[in-house]
Amino acid sequence: MTTSEVQVADFQLSPELLEFQQKVRSYAQQHLGGAAEYDAETKFPREPVEAAGKLGLLRTTVAKEYGGSAMGNLASCVMLEEINAACVSTGVTISVHNSLVNSLLGKWCNAEQKARWFPKLITGEWLGAYCLSEAYSGSDAAALRCTAEKQGDHYVMNGAKLWITTGSDAELFVIFARTAEDRVKGISAFVVEGSWDGVGVGKKERKLGLRGSPTTEIVLENVKVPADCLIDQEGNGFTIALDTLDGGRLGIASQGLGIARAAIDLIGEHLSNQKDKRGRPAASQPDQWQFADLASELDAYRFLTWRAATLRDRGIRCSTEAAMAKSCASRLSNRAARAAVSILGLVGAAGNNPAERLLRDARITEIYEGATDIQRLVIARGLLA
Amino acid sequence: MTTSEVQVADFQLSPELLEFQQKVRSYAQQHLGGAAEYDAETKFPREPVEAAGKLGLLRTTVAKEYGGSAMGNLASCVMLEEINAACVSTGVTISVHNSLVNSLLGKWCNAEQKARWFPKLITGEWLGAYCLSEAYSGSDAAALRCTAEKQGDHYVMNGAKLWITTGSDAELFVIFARTAEDRVKGISAFVVEGSWDGVGVGKKERKLGLRGSPTTEIVLENVKVPADCLIDQEGNGFTIALDTLDGGRLGIASQGLGIARAAIDLIGEHLSNQKDKRGRPAASQPDQWQFADLASELDAYRFLTWRAATLRDRGIRCSTEAAMAKSCASRLSNRAARAAVSILGLVGAAGNNPAERLLRDARITEIYEGATDIQRLVIARGLLA
Amino acid sequence: MHNLQLTEDQEMVVDTVRKLVVDAVTPKVQELDEHRSFAREWFDALSELGVYGLSISEEKGGAGMGLVPYVAALEVIGEQSASLSRLWIGQMQAALALEDAGGDLLDEVAAGAKLLTFVGPEHGFTFADGSLTGSATMVPAAAEADVLLVAAKEGDAVVLVTVEGAACSHTALRALGLNSAACGQLACEGVVATVVATGDAAEKAIDRAELAAWLGVAAASVGGGIGSIEASKKHAGERIAFGKPLLVQQAVQRKLVECGRAVEAARQLVWQAARLADLGQCAKQTAMQARIAAVDAMVLAADEAIQIHGGFGYTVEYHVERHYRDAKTFEVLDGGSDHLRDRLAAMQFT
Amino acid sequence: MHNLQLTEDQEMVVDTVRKLVVDAVTPKVQELDEHRSFAREWFDALSELGVYGLSISEEKGGAGMGLVPYVAALEVIGEQSASLSRLWIGQMQAALALEDAGGDLLDEVAAGAKLLTFVGPEHGFTFADGSLTGSATMVPAAAEADVLLVAAKEGDAVVLVTVEGAACSHTALRALGLNSAACGQLACEGVVATVVATGDAAEKAIDRAELAAWLGVAAASVGGGIGSIEASKKHAGERIAFGKPLLVQQAVQRKLVECGRAVEAARQLVWQAARLADLGQCAKQTAMQARIAAVDAMVLAADEAIQIHGGFGYTVEYHVERHYRDAKTFEVLDGGSDHLRDRLAAMQFT
């Protein structure tokens, strides 16, 4: 969807977006208190995701004619920052569902396909998963080996996808598979439903963080995929994947902002509590510097993120801008979380404080949906072109 | 002056500001080619400053009723980035004249005073200097010792001001002096004209950079200052100084952005020229990363700067936001200039390349109008209040 | 491997420790960490090697070999297990703190018959009328230690006391790292304690315990940094992306060069501090600098290792996420790096 | 002052150099720098001390004292004058490169009778039919050197040649730093050159010259870092702000602690590399790491020193702006730090 309305005037969100932000903030306060538990017990945040569905938060990137709220990329960014500031596992689930799956289907599927899948996706009855990575293709996505062989009115799909967010809990999978040999033009995109024969959930990863969000292998054994589940046309898969990632990167940038904000808030709270014997503020100067630097960068990279989102909302290509946002915000989230542990000290590392969880959760933002060094090369290429 | 019009919509400058930016860019191309010469010969950039006056660039912060163009803080930021990207010595001269002196007079002087001084200031017939620092009061501005003793219809001023930008070439001095003992409430602000008896230019500093801009001591020996040269009222000097510095900091933030941009452009040019034997791009990956990171931060901190400027243009207090902008942009300018020398290598250090001059010029931005650590404490205090 | 120029005896200690690490630690390190299992068996295996008396003087029944082989051996252990390093460090703190006082407990510490943990002055325990009061979080082996050696305040004076581990209350923590060292919360409410040293003797004992911690954590962090670098080299040498091994990419090489440089610089500080201490010179500042630099280098190396591993690095099987957690946990122990910075400042500027 | 544990002879060299620095260098360093005056008199004064033959073997007429006193003495000089350090480094490069070949020139170098500058292989000079062609920028003492020692290519082979300084054309530069070392542009168009070494001998000579540069720049940078820290301590101890000396502020202390730590770590790398070299072990990687770390530490210390000095730091009288310029100039010499990083990578990963 594209919009020509001004969403950010002189760096302030429009009244509609401010209202939406408040709504999401209330949702987070009501439903996302269990982040520590999802983490400790590697438990999927089902209740918060269902509540998000009921509140309409899973339809922000879907057009109104298919039941969506069509709020666009900027609204998604605003929402995802709020959610990730409270619970990163819920955040990534919604980010993948909205920013990758729903966005992709909305942009590249035909009307019949949209009518088929969106009713279940916008309510959260179905959750979506995005299956690009494989064991031998991470940053080098075009090296994928999963195959979809055309046999009459269907394709037979074989292979295995790795590091699939929501892998064990999703019902709809967007899968990139090879329909021809050409490294790039041999890749096509499909929708595969989890209930079909041959679709299996493989190994579940045990991870540093993001432990409430199941990351699994998806194994495809002779899966019969009807031809009308091909997205767009054969050979256009890589283009679709890259285009979608621009939006996905804004989702992860917003995740980074949310994590950074939560960590900075912990530091701020700690500093406010530092008092000398007479009750006067006594935060150490170097801690205050770090706090000031991190808080300044948070504002700055939020603007980078919002800039890219407004471009995308206007239908303008934003690969360079999205890469800037993701690269900067994801690195900030890690610096901020590490600083929180350093400054809170023993308390921050003790595991009954959110700081150490944020440190573990933050680390993934520099890796998935395009590692930092890839983002940097995208930026350099974009600017020097 | 305040405005309620939206100046930056979805992170894009308004058409008026874009046009103004183009105008300044042309000015820079035509008049600021001599930066290397002003530096090497420690020569005041008189021609560019005069040309700026003719083009109306010295009146941007002055209200229309006094002949100004009342373009406001954001326009000043846009202008100063362009000018500093070409010549930092010219940039600081105009920044002090516009962002400190003209801004201060416009906000705190009475109509008679404005009518007296602005006609000369807006054309550049007179240049302004801002005299706050002394040998024993830098970051601790309230420790100043210069005195102004009331004697009938005038004050007698004695003392010495240090590190005065444009000191030897200004005609109008805003001078902060002590009219009473109270550390803060004993400070008052005055306009002193350079032609008056007892106003002398002292030692001229030999500096690392900014060598085209004269930084001098201003010596005040029994200077008879008419009472109608008092700005606002007695004892309000420190408030005036702090308020003015918010605007001044935006000027220096923009200077930082301009320097950073120039350095990043040098790096980009160098990377574009790197080719392998077959003529294919061959810039080193780590150099590309640095370029990408610096360029991303440039965009991000420009938004921080513009945000603070739009707040100030709306009459909203922006100390925290201005400190964020100055702290981030000034540090970026130094990182970028150092990176340019590192990446350009021998060529960058050789002195016939702008890189080494940028490195020397950049260093002041973290020092004047509030050193970085002071900015950080302002930010921390602002956010934790 | 390194250029510490150890004597033959010292080299033998390091080789013996290395063999234990290869045979017993490496195969189980991931499993124990993931299940947060306390590494008592490794601690006991080190006892059998007799290392806990390594740096105690011969007249007090130790090997009198000084701190140089201690840092060399901890580097080897740290490459695999920060948790086991930390247990040895606690034991070494106790050994050095108790050395002057001597007695049965020192012998038991040196023999590894009892597992000790040191609770530093930063936790603010107080001692009065023969009993100890205070609480601390993130104490290694909090629940597992046989004896706690506590630096406490008695009025304004410093006193070093011991309490039985069983006499204190403990709470297990899901801590960030050092999962096999069982960091936990510890509380004593008027627990009967035995005075080991008071006055100058207590100050000196605490000084030595702190030095043992700084040097030990620094050496183990150097090892941890090496562990991350080696894991990265191995992975990047095998992993193919864009048609060639990752290790061929300048991107990856540059990261590893910088990590290696940071680790090597920290290592030189550790060695210098250990050498100074063994020569009887003041090693305090150098040891604190080493501790700060080495932990930072370990954090850097682990962070880059995760990045080089990509998605694999975020999973538990590739060890580097453990190094990352352990490095940040090392950082906050012993008062934390910023506290050390402030102490360095106090030594240098007042 | 330091813990290199020098022999008495080595210590004497350092003391003699320190005396020269205090008496002759310190009083004029600012003036010479500001006027971009070449420090020939200091170079000659060092000649009189006889230091240029310091590391040459006794059988070749040198003092045979190795590189350890070289780095110790350069640290002392670097604290005051990076320019003079750089002149000695060039001379040492020549001395070590010429040592195997021996001959009159070596004697003149060792005696300081001729001032040499070394032009490294990174400048890409070519040698054919007895004459040298090429150009280079930012060559220390480009116009002042009596003789240039150039690592050139003859076809695909490496060759080490000398040319008379007067036979080349020079252009002075307003360079970023090292103002008293007169860095300039240099061009030779078929200048008659004398071959000093070819083949393996040339490779070895160039290796030694590079090692001399890495160690020398590293040591001088450690000294420069110390210079910035000492200047900051002095200024911050005297300057009053908000009612107390700057040095009392945690802000200032923390900066100085971190600078001190970075400098000390770099210093340990330098010493280790010098010791390794003197033991006949391969010191190449450690020396390169030292060179990178020390220059970075000097940049950091100078940068923070300027900040601590505030407006004063931006003016020429307080020395720290000079350290800042000199540090960044050191960085880009000898191929530059990034080039060294790539060479380290090549050594470690291929």
Image: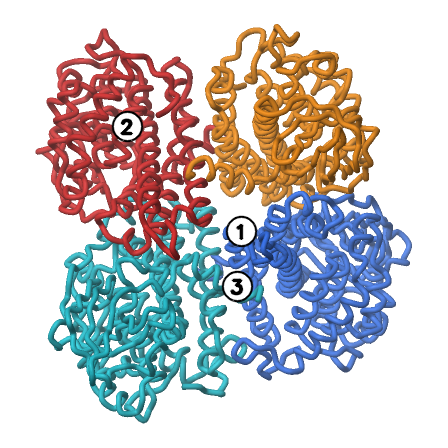
Chain colours: A cyan, B blue, C red, D orange
* Residues at discs 2 and 1 in contact (Cβ within 8 Å): no
Residue C104 pos. (x, y %): 13, 15
| Residue for point 22% across, 14% down | C101
User: Any mark on residue A381, and which?
Assistant: 3
Direction bottom: furthest residue: A65
At label 3, which amino acid type do we have?
A: Arg
Residue D18's image quarter?
Answer: top right
Question: Is residue C349 at least partly visible in the picture?
Answer: no
Q: Chain of mark 3?
A: A
At label 1, which amino acid type do we have?
A: Ser
Residue A301 pos. (x, y %): 47, 65
From the viewer's perspective, tell me whether residue A57 is left or right of residue B295.
left
Q: Are marks 2 and 1 on the same chain?
A: no
From the viewer's perspective, tell me whether residue B54 is left or right of residue A9.
right
From the viewer's perspective, tell me whether residue C108 is left or right of residue A265.
left
Q: Nearer the viewer, mark 2 or mark 1?
A: 1
Please tell me whether residue B359 is drawn above or below residue C10 in the rendered image. below
Question: Is residue C300 at least partly visible in the picture?
Answer: yes
Residue C199 pos. (x, y %): 30, 19
At label 2, which amino acid type do we have?
A: Leu
| Residue for point 63% across, 64% down | B250
Q: Nearer the viewer, residue D189 or D175?
A: D189
**Whole-number angstrom distance, CA of label 2 to CA of label 1:** 38 Å
**Which residue is tagged 1?**
B284
